[in-house]
Structures are given as C-alpha cells and as structure tokens.
Image: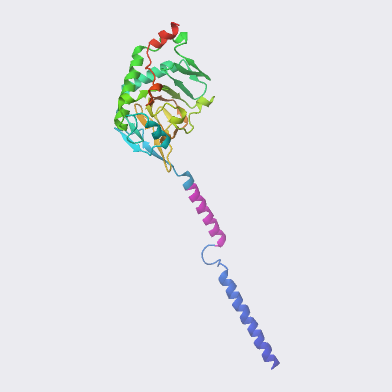
C-alpha cells in the first residue's frame, strides 16, 4: 500500500511538471517558428525610424509659380489680417476686393526688364555691400557701398551717371504695375501712390557682413515699412539659370507657397500679415529684382526720380 501511494504521488508530480513545462513553452516564442523576438524588435525600430525620417524630410512647400512656366496670371486669395484691413478703411477707393497674392509674366516686357537690369548694374558696379545683399534706390539716391550707404546724387564722380531716359523707363514700368494692381485688386489707380523705399536689389552668395545683408528672415512688409499697402516685386533674372536658391516664400499655416523668380515676372500682394514671407538664401550666382511698393496714404507718396536730382544737389 505504501509503495502504491508513492507511485501515485510520483506520477502526480511528473504530470504537474509536464503541464508546467507545456505552459512555459507556450509563453516562450519559438525559435523554430518565424523570426526571433530580437530580430522582430529591430525591424520595428528600423521601420519607425524610416517613418520619422520620411515625414520630417517631407517637403512643406508647394511651388505657386514655377520658373519654367510662362504665366498669364495666377492668384491666391488669403484672409486679410485685421490690422491691415482696419487701416485701409481710412482710404476710400484703396481697400482691396480681397487680400491676395498674384503672379503674372504678362505685364512688363523682357525688353523693359533688360533695360532695368542695365540701369541697376550700371550703378551697382560703383557700389556693392561687403556682404551678399546690395540695394540701389534711385528715388532717394541711396546705394550700398561697403558696410554703409552713399548718396549717388552727392558723389561727384557719379554725377549724371543716370540719364533721363533711364528714369523714364522706371516711370513707364511703374505705371504699368500701378494699373495692374488697380485691376487685380479692385482699387482706383489714382488712389495708390509710389512710396519709399523703391529699389533695385542685388543678392549673391557672399557671407552676410552687416544686418542689412540678412535678407532671409521672415517678415511682414507693413510692419517693416509703415507706408506699404501693396508690395510688388519685379524679377530681373532667372532662378536656376542666373542663380540658385533665392526663391520667394509666402508663409502659410499648413504649407508654404513658393515663387521661383523669372525674368520679367511680376509678383503683387497685399502688404499685411496675411502675406508674411522671406527669401531663401542665394547659394550661387546673382539674383536681381526691383521692389516697387504702393501706399494709400498720400503723405507717404514719393516723386519719380529725374535728372533734376543731380542739379538740385550740386547747385546748393
């Protein structure tokens, strides 16, 4: 009887051990079936990293205007910023139908732009910033030179560098742009005026020397220049041909809109926070453009440049 009890007890222990081994075996991943757990874990980590890299490098820009396209006109309506539209209520006939940006290659001719480029380079060869950004303002006479600005109308060696024919080209182009703004934004042309600063810009890949060379920071034109109500940019050189980098970027909530400069391309937009923007750094070549802003406030209006600027200064 004692031996029988021992055998039953022994058999019970054996059965319990077998059952426990089977349970443990069921929990433990099989080396023979599928991939080992360590390998599976590594695969999951790698896939996760690839997903992160994909979405972090995903382009957040859309090309609003390509250099390769000849555009009769393309527009994008944006919601007016409250400060901008509130101010324009003071100026009858100058508030836009919609706040927007509009790009066209049909307002200014390539021949006119080549004349403007000739005028810009004629002056800037006597100036130029130590850094990558230089300006020439024929309305005020300001031109970048070294780390400062000079007045071209006061420099004896630059007297009569520009002719009345040069100034006439600028006036004709400005008038074309003025009437284009009136048409596309629904304002009265006699209610918008040229304002300061109107200037040529020359941007290269040289390292910034002063804060004036740091053109790539995001900004709002109406904040930078109180007089601005409508901003226009006329491009005098070609993205991807004359220079690399230097695209113009409108900053939007979800995806930014990029304008690739094209010779004779005109970009027009309301100057409020609805059109916050920046210019990419130029990485090679030289980018030329002309900024031609307009104001609704007549007290900020400026006169057209003329040969009389030389005569007034040198006769004093």
Q: Where is residue 35 in the image (x, y as percent from the top left)?
A: 53, 62
Report the coloring of the rendering.
rainbow
Chief secondary structure of the magenta portion = helix
Depth check: give the residue in front, 12 or 65: 65
Q: Is residue 73 shown to the viewer in this render? A: yes
| Residue farthest top in this picture | 315
Q: Position of residue 72 (x, y in %)?
A: 29, 32
Q: Is residue 206 shown to the viewer in this render? A: no
Depth check: give the residue in front, 209 or 313: 313
Above/below status of 122 relative to 39: above
Q: Residue at x 33, y 18 (%)?
A: 169
| Residue farthest right in this picture | 2
Name the quadrant of the N terminus.
Answer: bottom right
Q: Position of residue 166 (x, y in %)?
A: 35, 15
Q: How many marks?
A: 0
**The residue stretch that appears in magenta:** 36-54
Q: In which quarter of the image is residue 89?
A: top left
On the rendered structure, is 68 left or right of 142?
left
Depth check: give the residue in front, 80 or 154: 80
Above/below status of 286 relative to 315: below
Q: Position of residue 255 (x, y in %)?
A: 42, 42
Q: In which quarter of the image is residue 94?
A: top left
Name the quadrant of the C terminus.
Answer: top left
On the rendered structure, is 17 left or right of 227?
right
Q: Residue 41 magenta-drawn?
A: yes
| Residue farthest bottom in this picture | 1
Q: Residue 89 magenta-drawn?
A: no
Above/below status of 167 relative to 285: above
């Amino acid at each position: 009887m004692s031996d029988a009890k021992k055998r039953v007890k022994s058999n019970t222990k054996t059965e319990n051990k077998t059952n426990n081994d089977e349970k443990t075996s069921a929990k433990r991943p099989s080396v023979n079936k599928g991939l080992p757990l360590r390998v599976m874990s590594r695969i999951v980590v790698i896939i996760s990293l690839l997903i992160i890299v994909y979405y972090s490098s995903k382009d957040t820009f859309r090309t609003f205007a390509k250099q390769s396209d000849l555009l009769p006109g393309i527009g994008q309506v944006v919601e007016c910023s409250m400060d901008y539209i509130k101010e324009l209520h003071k100026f009858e006939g100058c508030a836009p139908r919609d706040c927007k940006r509009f790009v066209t290659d049909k307002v200014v001719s390539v021949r006119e732009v080549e004349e403007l480029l000739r005028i810009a380079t004629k002056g800037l060869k006597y100036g130029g910033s130590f850094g990558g950004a230089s300006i020439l303002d024929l309305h005020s006479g300001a031109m970048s030179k070294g780390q400062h600005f000079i007045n071209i109308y006061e420099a004896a060696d630059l007297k009569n560098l520009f002719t009345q024919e040069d100034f006439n080209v600028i006036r004709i182009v400005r008038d074309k742009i003025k009437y284009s703004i009136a048409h596309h934004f629904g304002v009265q042309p006699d209610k918008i005026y040229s304002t300061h600063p109107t200037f040529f810009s020359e941007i290269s890949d040289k390292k910034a020397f002063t804060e004036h060379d740091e053109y790539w920071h995001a900004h709002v034109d109406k904040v930078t220049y109180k007089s601005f109500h409508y901003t226009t940019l006329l491009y005098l050189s070609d993205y991807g041909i004359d220079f690399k980098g230097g695209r113009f970027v409108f900053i939007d909530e979800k995806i930014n809109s990029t304008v690739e400069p094209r010779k004779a391309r005109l970009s027009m937009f309301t100057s409020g926070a609805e059109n916050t923007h920046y210019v990419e750094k130029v990485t090679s070549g030289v980018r030329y453009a002309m900024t031609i802003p307009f104001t609704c406030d007549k007290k900020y209006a400026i006169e057209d440049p003329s040969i009389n600027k030389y005569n007034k200064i040198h006769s004093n």
